[in-house]
Amino acid sequence: MLNALSVALVAAPQISHADVDPAAARSADEWLAFMNRAFVERSYDGVFSYFDGTDLATLRVVHAIVDGVQRERLVHLNGAPREILRRGDDVSCILQPGDAMLALQESIPSGPFARAFTRSFEGISRNYDMTLQGDDRVADRAAVVIHVSPRDHDRYGYRLWLDRDKGLLLRSELVDMTGARLEIFQFAHVTIDESVDRLALEPVSSDGAVVNHLTLANAPNAAVVDHMPWYAQWVPNGFAMATRDVRRAPSTDQPVDTLMYSDGLAAFFGVYREPAGNGRSHVRVAQWGDGCGYPGRGRSAQCPLSGDCGRRTAGCDRATCRTLSPLFP
Amino acid sequence: MSSQLKESLSAVVDGEADEFELRRVLDETGRNPELLASWRRYHAIGALIRGEVTGGSSFARTSLNRVWAGLARGEAAADPASGARFDMASSSWVRRLAGTAVAASVALGVIAGFGQFGTPSGVADSIASAVQSPPVLTVPVAARLDADANPDASADAADAYVEANDELYREVIATAPAPVDAEQLRSFPSASDVVRSQGYILLHAHQVGVNRPAGPTAFVKVAAFESR
């Protein structure tokens, strides 16, 4: 009995330490899960900066659960006044007249967009190593640092700073294989789990504003999916198909097939198939943070690619375009 | 001069050297005549391209005006033989010296005329010819590259200078991009390719946002999108 008591007395401080500071007991995986829950469940109101590799933007985000419904408003604070509103599963983008994005959206398929078949992908650990890297401080809040390191060159890595108490993402860096930062997100100021003014969740009304609804409430139509006549023969290691879709570009009314692939974390890799036209290059012509665009040129169709993926993956666009094959002979 | 020292000098000229490297280069120029000469050449060329060199001559200013006028028109170099054109403004070597993108062949054409011809009219003619029909970089150019370049110097002196500094010109030729043929030119992206690529990047940002959990990063790329 004495031995058992001794064991209990020795063990008790460790157990009580974990109860007092659950943060100390969490693994990197658990911290990521904590972060995802914080995004959805907590109320927060903050101003943050977003660096996309070439330019710096400032935005405000307000998030709260109102009458059981998730509400969020994202406001672009410099340049073109844009707002992204979320009410439950419905997401809409509000643009003002004269916004350059309006003209660009005329040439590409518009929303709403299909959600992924499933939002939980197994095997993230097959593609990434996740490690805790100590503590830091962001926006005057204590933070835990996590590195999410890719195991190959087909994807980028991440450095994450999570609020030590609430789990909310305070800062993130997207890094390439050399450690160079492609994107940076960082709160300058944020309040978490304090009351949120409901008016802060409502858009600023203005005449002539254009509202684009971005989401479908339901999963993609299975019949549409089964009859997609093509697929990509090559995709990067660890990527699986996430969505399939067919829509039309407003300006041309041409159908554009879409395949989206994900490796389960944040990387998506998109292949779009449109009728053969004037696209004439495999050369990467657009780079924005982690996203890159290739006009693409296939045998019987144009196959633009866009991806949040490593440079080596993006460089394999030629193989993907050339080997696109019909599902049936 | 060792290749490492050359690399360090290049880094200093590019403005990319750290303090340690800068100190090393500065220290070496005091006891390495070859390094000092290279340093002077790089800065002399850069000064000329940037319009900081006049040598008391109005023709230097005229020549630079023609260079910048050519740039404003978006002129690219052309291979007189094939007619294939290539954009020399991306030449890292000249961009390094000028501190900005410069049509290298145009600038070198200026340098070619600036020391080779002894008369003002000769200089003006040579510069005008260089701007309108830029030479292919494989043609050796003769120039006086001192900061106090004298446009009245003889061609013989210019040739002698070239022979003494042929390493510089070999570097120019080695780092200049080769002319592209018509097939390569056809594979270059068109303006519509660029617009479509930007459009699909935006589309991609929409789809990624839809498939991420709520949070500031889900749609940040859509909200902050800027056409480029």
Image: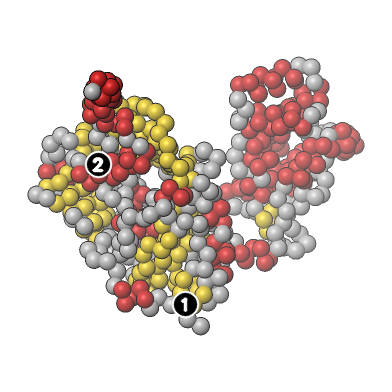
Residue A327 is tagged as 1
Q: Which residue is mark 2?
A: A38
Amino acid carrying label 1: it is Leu
Amino acid carrying label 2: it is Ala
B26 or B148: which is nearer to us? B26
Q: Position of residue A175 (x, y in %)?
A: 47, 41
Give the residue furthest to the bottom. A329
Looking at the image, residue A224 lies above or below residue B214? below
Q: Are marks 2 and 1 in contact (CB under 8 Å)?
A: no
Q: Earlier in the sequence, mark 2 or mark 1?
A: 2
Subunit that carries the residue with mark 1: A
B198 or A2: which is nearer to us? A2
Subunit that carries the residue with mark 2: A
The answer to which image quadrant residue A107 occupies is: bottom left
Q: Residues within 10 Å of mark 2 (few under 14, many from 20)?
A: many
Q: Position of residue A314 (x, y in %)?
A: 53, 56
Please state if A204 lies on the left or on the right of A18 as rendered: left
Q: Secondary structure at mark 1?
A: loop
Q: Is residue A301 visible?
A: yes
Residue for point 76% across, 45% down? B174
Q: CA distance from mark 2 to mark 1?
A: 42 Å
Looking at the image, residue A287 lies above or below residue A13? below
